[in-house]
Image (cartoon, helix red, strand yellow):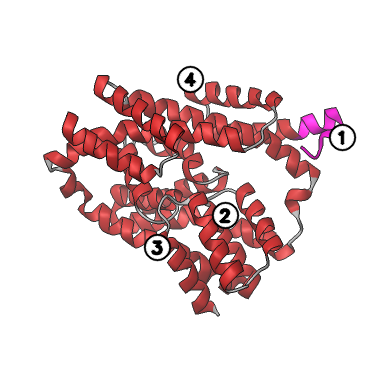
Amino acid sequence: MLFNLFYVFAKIGAFTLGGGYAMVPLIQSEVVDKRKWIDKEEFVDILAVAQSTPGALAINMATFIGYRKKGILGSIFATLGCVCPSFFSILIIAMFFTRFMNYKIVERAFCGIRPAVAALIAFSVFKIAKSSSIKSFYYIFTAAAFILVAFVKLDPILIIIISAVLGILILKIRGEKDADN
Amino acid sequence: MLIIRLFLIFAKIGAFSIGGGYAMLPFIQREIIDNNHYLNLKEFSDILAISQMTPGPIAINSATFVGYKIAGVLGSVAATLGIVLPSFIMIIIIASFFVKFYDKKEVKAAFSGIRPAVLGLLAAAAYSVTITNVIDLKSIFIFILSFGILFIKKMDPIIVLIISAVLGIILY
């Protein structure tokens, strides 16, 4: 079982490009559909916990599923499985990267890639805004966080803590009726 | 002691970056680029592009890469362990109680504040990466084109990166 946990998550880690949400359907097909380690409802619960805890989504899910199946050892094997493929592939690339970067053609390719990376990040802002059902009032948080980090250069960790506290304060002030949203 | 520092820095990043992936960006930028000057934003953009194109979670990939760039193989081990450990411990605690902690209304309320703020943090990262990387007419063209095909065609980011690499070779 421990070896299976490692193997399944290593397979998932090795074959999903792009990370994050790209890995969710793969995890679901392996763990829920094929191996029936957990049922559908539990999978959704695990996804919700993985999203609301810090860190990489796929790793969080691996840790959780590993723990549900085989306790602490299970979570260690599943997490290691998920991390190993990307760790080694990145390590190999990083080792050759500096030498590789000295080629003129690679340098020019990266001149094109850099603005595209900016577009990817900018686009992810749109995508998250569209999919995350944030109520219009709360976009004040978004605007404030943007200004405070981009221009005032406040520590983003501080922003997370303050916005969590404010979220709870708003609940207390508005009363219980809004609690579900 | 660079190794221990790296571990601690990435553990801090791992402990606060809710949402994973690009949501980690503002934290890495703060710690690795602004505070400690281990890398500049341009180098970090290149690392991000590679992390996007290689398998696995972006957060882990970029931690491994940054760790290696700063302190070699040991550095990459320290950074990867650092980024994984906080969520690992947190998930185990949650899983072992399996209380539906996210159903508690205080937790929900906290997240109704955190979620929009994370979006703002991400926007700030997008802003700083854009002003560093989009610097001339050619890069403005590539930026608009990439954004356009992501928006209209919903194309895989990896294909967008490949197209822009080809454009870079042609244009520069």
Q: For the residue labelled by badge 4, is the local secondary structure a helix, a strand or a loop?
A: loop
Q: For the residue labelled by badge 2, is the local secondary structure a helix, a strand or a loop?
A: helix
Where residue A151 sits: x, y (%)?
A: 48, 20
Whole-Å distance between the Cαs marked 2 and 4?
29 Å
Q: Name the mark nearer the viewer: 2 or 3.
A: 3
- Residue for point 82% across, 34% down: A178
- Residue for point 28% across, 36% down: B164
Q: Earlier in the sequence, mark 4 or mark 1?
A: 4
- Residue for point 44% across, 30% down: B126
Which chain's residue wears label 3?
A: A
Instruction: Read off the magenta span.
Output: A168-181
What residue would you read off at disc 2? B87
Where residue A1 sits: x, y (%)?
A: 55, 80
Tell me whether marks 4 and 3 sit on the same chain. yes
Q: Name the mark nearer the viewer: 4 or 1.
A: 1
Task: Report the amino acid beneath label 3.
Answer: Ala
Tell me whether marks 2 and 3 sit on the same chain. no
Q: Are marks 1 and 2 in contact (CB under 8 Å)?
A: no
| A124 left or right, relative to B75 | right
What residue would you read off at disc 3? A14
What residue would you read off at disc 4? A151
Whole-Å distance between the Cαs marked 4 and 1?
36 Å
Whole-Å distance between the Cαs marked 1 and 2?
31 Å
Which chain's residue wears label 4?
A: A
Q: Earlier in the sequence, mark 3 or mark 1?
A: 3
Tell me whether marks 4 and 1 sit on the same chain. yes
Task: Report the amino acid beneath label 4.
Answer: Phe
Q: Is residue A179 magenta?
A: yes
